[in-house]
């Protein structure tokens, strides 16, 4: 990291904050949620306890902040994937696959933490942003004829998001890709079969 | 209820047990989980407290038993729906729709209770039975050519079950039916499109 940047107080504070989040996440992953203390976090992060309390009142607040950062990173990643180009159908497939892979990977991260953290305003906000992004891609696809238009884009977005959470239970990335295929197939314009 | 039946001790015990479960479920639905006491349950069920304690040690145990009964009833309903006849494709659609409607309806029943109860061995067992039932119907459909064979039946069963939980967020039965259509469409043999 360039020193010049680090010389501003703002940047220093941000670095300390990031270090606290990283340390806490690592401790929780290691030894579970219940046993992590503020003293331990301070020690592992290499700061004093008094300093730690200037940043966060307790371990729960740190975990919330860490989770908020994770979710923002995931959303940022999905936006990047969407903006990589291609037509709306390629974008939709890319975003759905990226979302499924996130579900697939984060499932390893312990149910305890997930249950504790999957509430809060930032989660609801992020879910809404994600749903809006997917709905917009579906609406585009529907206009282009790639996606069925007999079901509202918002209903299809809800279907996608639920269907792809199955990725958390799958054993391989290949299986995740098949799930994305099946999910997309459900949204294609219906063809009348014999 | 015919008296003759009720005259056996077995049947009487079963009736009391059912009455306790019904009373407790109604109390919890009314006033929330935290405030329901054993005294209140005994009073509302019209039995003594000592009798109540012969059946259940605490309110949590009653709720677990109630939930187990609910789940058994849901599974029984799905088996009935499956056995109503038709070919395997009609059976699959009927079972998926019945499952989606259960998800749709039980969503109204309060998140607090759901979070508390959706663990426990009986839930895992019932989920496995449900998944097995759906997987068998999918495997049949795949043999008959109604369902794609490029994805394993068990993966498709997982996809269905996750996708259809979206029914819990839908506003109408018509929307639930559309979700079942979309979910089934994802499982049709792929058609090569232009």
Image: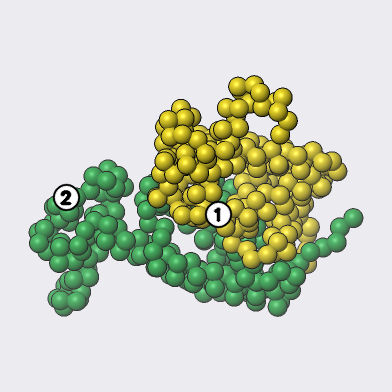
Chain colours: A yellow, B green
Q: Residue A56 location, x and y as percent?
A: 46, 32
Q: Residue A59 location, x and y as percent?
A: 43, 40
Q: Residue at x 27, y 43 (%)?
A: B31
User: Can you identify the residue that label 2 sits on?
Assistant: B40
Is residue B38 something one can see in this rendering? yes
Q: In the picture, which quadrant includes the C terminus of chain B?
A: bottom right
Q: Residue at x 15, y 63 (%)?
A: B53
In three-dimensional space, the C-alpha distance between marks 1 and 2, rounded to whole angstroms, equals 42 Å
Q: Residue at x 44, y 70 (%)?
A: B125
Vertical placement of residue A61 versus B146, above or below: above
Residue B3 location, quadrant? bottom left
Vertical placement of residue B131 versus A93, above or below: below
**Would you call the spot at circle 1 few (<14 residues within 10 Å), some (14-19), or many (20 or more)?**
few
Q: Residue A101 location, x and y as percent?
A: 68, 54
Q: Which of B49 and B140 is in front in this view?
A: B49
Q: In the picture, which quadrant includes the N terminus of chain B?
A: bottom left
User: Can you identify the residue that label 1 sits on?
Assistant: A109
Question: Viewed as shown, does residue B18 lie left or right of A124?
Answer: left
Q: Residue B166 location, x and y as percent?
A: 56, 50
What chain does badge 1 belong to? A
Question: Viewed as shown, does residue B60 lie left or right of B46?
Answer: right
Residue A144 location, quadrant? top right
Give residue A57's mark. none
What chain does badge 2 belong to? B
**Would you call the spot at circle 2 few (<14 residues within 10 Å), some (14-19), or many (20 or more)?**
some
Q: Residue at x 54, y 73 (%)?
A: B132
Q: Do the residues labelled 1 and 2 touch (CB within 8 Å)?
A: no
Q: Is mark 1 on a helix, strand or loop?
A: helix
């Amino acid at each position: 990291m360039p020193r010049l940047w680090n010389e501003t107080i703002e940047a220093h504070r941000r670095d300390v904050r990031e270090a606290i989040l990283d340390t806490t996440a690592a401790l929780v992953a290691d030894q579970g949620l219940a046993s992590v203390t503020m003293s331990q976090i301070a020690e592992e992060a290499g700061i004093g306890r008094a300093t730690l309390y200037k940043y966060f009142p307790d371990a729960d607040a740190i975990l919330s902040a860490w989770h908020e950062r994770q979710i923002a990173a995931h959303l940022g990643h999905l936006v990047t994937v969407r903006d990589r180009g291609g037509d709306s159908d390629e974008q939709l497939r890319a975003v759905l696959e990226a979302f499924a892979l996130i579900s697939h990977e984060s499932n390893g991260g312990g149910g305890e933490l997930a249950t504790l953290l999957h509430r809060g305003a930032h989660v609801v906000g992020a879910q809404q942003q994600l749903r809006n992004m997917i709905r917009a891609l579906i609406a585009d696809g529907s206009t282009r004829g790639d996606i069925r238009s007999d079901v509202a884009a918002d209903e299809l977005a809800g279907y996608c998001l639920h269907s792809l959470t199955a990725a958390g239970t799958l054993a391989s990335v290949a299986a995740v890709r098949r799930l994305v295929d099946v999910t997309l197939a459900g949204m294609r314009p219906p063809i009348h079969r014999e």
